[in-house]
Image (cartoon, rainbow, N blue to C red):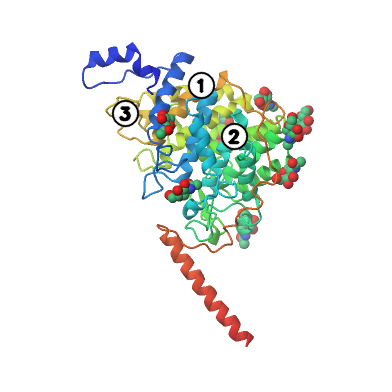
Amino acid sequence: MLPLSLSSPRWLATAVLLGARVTYAAFKLDTIEDIKETAATVAWDLMQYYHGNESGQTPGILPGPPPAGDYYWWEAGAMWGTLIDYWHWTGDDSYNDVITQAMLWQVGPNRDYMPPNVTASLGNDDQGFWGMSAMLAAENGFPDPPEDEPQWLALAQAVFNTQASPTRHDDTCGGGLRWQIPWSNNGYNYKNSIANGCFFNLGARLARYTGNQSYADWAEKTWDWMVGVGYIDKDYNIYDGGHVEQNCTDINRAQFSYNNAIFLLGAAYMYNYTNGSDVWAARVNGLVNSTLRTFFRDNVAYEVACEEHMSCTTDMLSFKGYLHRWLATATEVAPFIRDTVLPVLRTSAEAAVSTCTGEENGRTCGFQWVKRQYDGSKGAGQQMNVLGAVSALLVEYSKPPLTNGTGGTSKGDPMAGSRSDTLTQEVKPPTGGDKAGAAILTFVVLATTVGAFTWMSMGE
Ligand SMILES: *[C@@H]1O[C@H](CO)[C@@H](O)[C@H](O)[C@H]1NC(C)=O
Ligand SMILES: *[C@@H]1O[C@H](CO)[C@@H](O)[C@H](O)[C@H]1NC(C)=O
Ligand SMILES: *[C@@H]1O[C@H](CO)[C@@H](O)[C@H](O)[C@H]1NC(C)=O
Ligand SMILES: *[C@@H]1O[C@H](CO)[C@@H](O)[C@H](O)[C@H]1NC(C)=O
Ligand SMILES: *[C@@H]1O[C@H](CO)[C@@H](O)[C@H](O)[C@H]1NC(C)=O
Ligand SMILES: *[C@@H]1O[C@H](CO)[C@@H](O)[C@H](O)[C@H]1NC(C)=O
Ligand SMILES: *[C@@H]1O[C@H](CO)[C@@H](O)[C@H](O)[C@H]1NC(C)=O
Ligand SMILES: *[C@@H]1O[C@H](CO)[C@@H](O)[C@H](O)[C@H]1NC(C)=O
């Protein structure tokens, strides 16, 4: 199934004119139809990275996790969100069945996006990305699954509830979520912005969707914690995180675009939920300022922590897409930022598509958009970025996120996730490839055994 654009005479003419080495005529974004056609082609190219619906493959995931393939579990969760927005903004439902199958396959035994297969690298952020995609399905009015299957809103609530549980919110650093969920994982001692950003973002959106203040209270609390601990500074820079051993004062000052975008979108929802409060308006303004200042060069998205020397990891190579999509959606729930944000997204999207001239099909997209030509970098993240940037150009022509009171039909369950595993307390057997975790586990088991003997001899 080729996208329309490939079979159209325009492409044939281009191919004929240029001979064997087909240089792809630049993607066009001039009209709504241009944007849809471009997005369709980029979406099709993105889906070439997905094999989960082929026989013998696992539905829902991209090739991985490393070393089995390039992509961690979370990135597929992010990809389904990208495609749910793609459907919402363009109306193209070609991938809806694949999306639904994927999103439902990965829910795990407790319907909370903690499938046992991924325990060895399961962070609150990983779970959060799947939860946010489920939330997006509810907000976009994505077709509801059959009644005997988990429902989008309930899945988002399950993720939120597991993260709001006291077992995940300990008192180190005065609160906040840790990065990893299982205590035996490398990174369990790190409290970071993206994990808390996912929780904040989900809380704000659940508050607006359901009207339940409890979610907003958690969002407020998370925001206050982020500021209190210094991960968000007075200029609205957002830093990556810190370790519990140092009470989170050893702040890693790397800045990533998805951190700003996730907090900006959550703040915009809080602004909306509070009927336009001054407090949240100021935070939205501050975040728009810092985001445009830090992550755009001449109005083109730029991943400042790693782009100059192209030291970005596979994860980081997908952040620009979230940046574009979340800024776009923020303009719907906080319309006062529209005139500042939308022209930047437009310029950036134009630069983005100008990198899509790589590889043999003449349309693989690159990563360094500021170069406005293909830079040799390719992957699912790079395609997802451009798809997000292009499809988000249609945000002005589409319905804002629904709520339970304005047409949202997804069924919720306020108690979802309450019977979930608390991996923070359980001793799980180590899984392959998790050496650091296994080492820590061995150490703790030894310590516990020694402790038990000591206790027994003292008891004698
Ligand atoms: C998998 O999904 C793609 C759409 O992304 C579709 O083109 C393809 O036919 C599907 N493959 C199978 C085996 O169903
Ligand atoms: C877990 O892994 C097994 C073996 O690869 C696979 O069959 C199963 O579908 C996976 N489950 C999920 C939820 O991904
Ligand atoms: C640890 O950090 C939290 C949050 O910044 C702070 O409230 C608390 O006083 C700190 N504790 C110590 C012992 O410094
Ligand atoms: C509101 O959300 C809280 C927290 O998830 C839940 O305990 C409570 O039951 C919800 N209230 C309603 C009316 O759904
Ligand atoms: C943006 O933030 C900088 C640094 O905090 C500040 O100097 C500037 O006035 C802000 N600009 C706007 C338009 O708010
Ligand atoms: C927002 O306004 C609506 C309608 O006036 C009101 O019902 C609701 O309680 C307000 N929400 C907040 C959080 O103040
Ligand atoms: C909240 O979002 C809706 C779109 O869903 C928008 O019409 C409304 O103006 C927003 N409220 C505020 C206070 O901006
Ligand atoms: C959502 O809306 C439905 C129908 O409009 C209503 O029955 C239900 O109580 C609402 N749920 C919440 C959580 O407000």
The reply to whether discs 3 and 2 touch (Cβ–Cβ < 8 Å) is: no
**Which residue is depicted at the point 46% across and 24% down?**
390
Quadrant in which ligand 7 is drawn: top right
Is 113 placed above or below 3 here?
below
Q: Amino acid at mark 1?
A: Thr
Disc 1 packing (10 Å; few <14; some 14–19; many ≥20): many
Provide the residue designation for mark 1.
90
Outermost residue on the bottom side: it is 460
Q: For marks 3 and 2, give the CA distance.
A: 40 Å
Q: In the picture, residue 203 is in which quadrant?
A: top right
User: Dividing the image into 4 quarters, which one contains the N terminus?
Assistant: top left
Q: What number is the disc on residue 314?
A: none
Instruction: Indicate left or right for 120 with 287 as reference.
Output: left
Q: Amino acid at mark 2?
A: Pro
Q: Earlier in the sequence, mark 1 or mark 3?
A: 1
Pick the residue in front: 75 or 216: 75
Provide the residue designation for mark 3.
374
Q: x, y (%) of residue 281?
A: 66, 32
Q: Earlier in the sequence, mark 3 or mark 2?
A: 2
The reply to whether discs 1 and 2 touch (Cβ–Cβ < 8 Å) is: no
Instruction: Indicate left or right for 216 with 398 as reference.
Output: right
**Element under label 1?**
helix
Provide the residue designation for mark 2.
145
